[in-house]
Amino acid sequence: YLKPKSNENCEILELNLEIFPNPVKISSNVDPEGNEQLIALFEQSTTIFTVELIAKVHLTPFNPFDFYFIPKDAQKLPMRYDAEQRRVLSPYLVNETLPAEIIVLSNQLLYKANTYTSAFLMEINQFICDEFTYEIREEGRAHLPNFTLSQKRGSCRDFAVLFASICQAQGLATRFVSGYYVGQSPQDVPDQSHNLHAWVEVYLPGGGWKGFDPTQNEVVCGNHVALATSFDLNLIPPVAGYYHGDSPSTLSTSVNLRLV
């Protein structure tokens, strides 16, 4: 999952993928959630495996709030999707009991937002950015939301999971996004330009999927490049696979983003 997702706000101008050793086959697959997945197959033995992708994209700034809630009742929470929407959105709705502390926090933020949907989402962004310490953690799955809440610190993927759980407590459908942040971070916000990044999209009736980045305290509006989206962040790592052999392995990664 390394190819940027093309849409009306992100146009791919150049794309070059190099893999060593040379695969005997590269196929393009579309996964069940609509992400393009490149699958490479190998036959020969090797002591090194590298993947390099160089892309040039054109990002168009946009106003994420330029829409009407349909029906109008959706501008206030809790969210009540109609039956047809719920069938489609079922993987992105909460399917287990949320921790009590998450529900309490969600209700507190909802009260501050006077139950307005857009204001509630901005309150979550602000709360996580103000109250939590960012840390880089390159390995491991995202922490459970109640653990992140208790520690008051985490990585971008931890913040994304916490954001999603707070939303789901009010009936909002959420999904995770893997990608890059290419905006200019404020001085008091961690710079994500040299790391793979994660954020959340929330489905708003009448507006569709809208992105929220609690690490940057930003609504997605032209500073993010998405690679893949999923109801489960662990399903969309940038590179995954299998190898045979007993040799120990080490992983190194490098991300270089620049405006041109």
Image (spheres, helix red, strand yellow):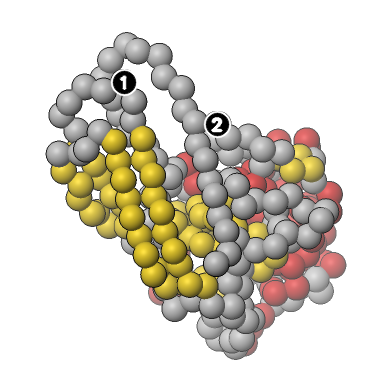
Question: Residue 217: x percent and y percent?
Answer: 73, 61
Q: Looking at the image, which residue is at 70% across and 74% down?
A: 118
- Give the residue number, with chain letter if any, for mark 1: 47
Q: Position of residue 122 (x, y in %)?
A: 74, 67
Figure quadrant of residue 166: bottom right
Closer to the camera, 48 or 212?
48
Query: Can see residue 131?
Result: yes
The residue pinned by badge 2 equals 140
From the viewer's perspective, tell me whether residue 50 is left or right of residue 172.
left
Q: Relative to the observer, which residue lies in front, 57 or 62? A: 57
Residue 31 image offset from top left, x and y in percent: 30, 54
Picture layout, residue 34 above or below residue 68: above
* Relative depth, front residue between 208 and 45: 45
- Mark 2, secondary structure of its residue: loop
Horizontal relation, residue 191 to residue 178: left or right:
right
Q: Nearer the viewer, mark 1 or mark 2?
A: 1
What residue is drawn where x is 54% and y is 49%? 256
Measuring from the top left, give residue 121's x and y in whole percent.
Answer: 70, 67
Residue at x 53%, y 46% (from the top left corner)? 255
The answer to whether 211 appears left or right of 28 in the picture is: right
Kind of residue sitting beneath label 1: Thr
User: Is 176 located above or below residue 242 in the figure?
Assistant: below
Callout 2, which amino acid? Answer: Gly
Q: CA distance from mark 1 to mark 2?
A: 24 Å
Element assignment for label 1: loop
Quadrant (top left/top right/bottom left/bottom right) for the C terminus: bottom right
Quick check: can you spot residue 168? no
Residue 158: which quarter of the image? top right
